[in-house]
Amino acid sequence: MFEFETKEAEFAFKDLIKKTDESEPCRKEYASKYDSSTDIWVETWSKNKEVSKEQAVALCSNEDGTKCHVFEECGLYAMLAHEPLGVWGGTVPSERKKK
């Protein structure tokens, strides 16, 4: 089992998981473009490259421009867990390191 650095991070993760339903924009993006070498997920995860803040927010937004329904919970978890990789709730790794 995964161990969280803090209880706050653990609670935030559990809250995030309870609220996800696989309709999140990031999951759709990931599923539709997983094999692409230009895919934002491949770039941010396996190659550990950072995207711009604008790209991060766009990834975490629906087609109509509204934020994902777990945007806040996702970003909160990433901040509390000091998530070192990827886009979470419109945040990027360098932004999370500042907090």
Image: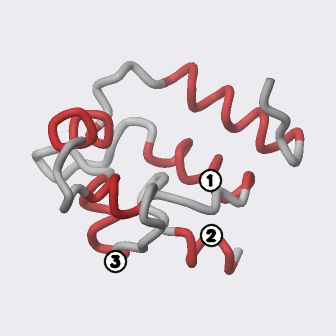
Q: Residues within 10 Å of mark 1 (few under 14, many from 20)?
A: many
Q: Is residue 72 left or right of residue 49?
A: right
* 82 on left or right of 60: right
Residue assigned mark 1: 78
Q: Is residue 38 above or below residue 52?
A: above
> Which of the pair 96/40 is nearer the observer?
40
Image disc number at residue 52: 3
Image vertical order of residue 61 relative to residue 12, above or below? below
What is the CA distance from the residue labelled 3 to the residue labelled 2?
13 Å
In-front residue for pair 25/43: 43
* Location of residue 24 in the rendering, given as x and y in whole percent from the top left corner: 32, 33
Where is mark 2, residue-wise? 96
Name which quarter of the figure residue 56 lies in.
Answer: bottom left
Identified at 77% across, 33% down, the residue is 11
Q: Amino acid at mark 2?
A: Arg
Tag 2 or tag 3, which sits nearer the N-term? 3
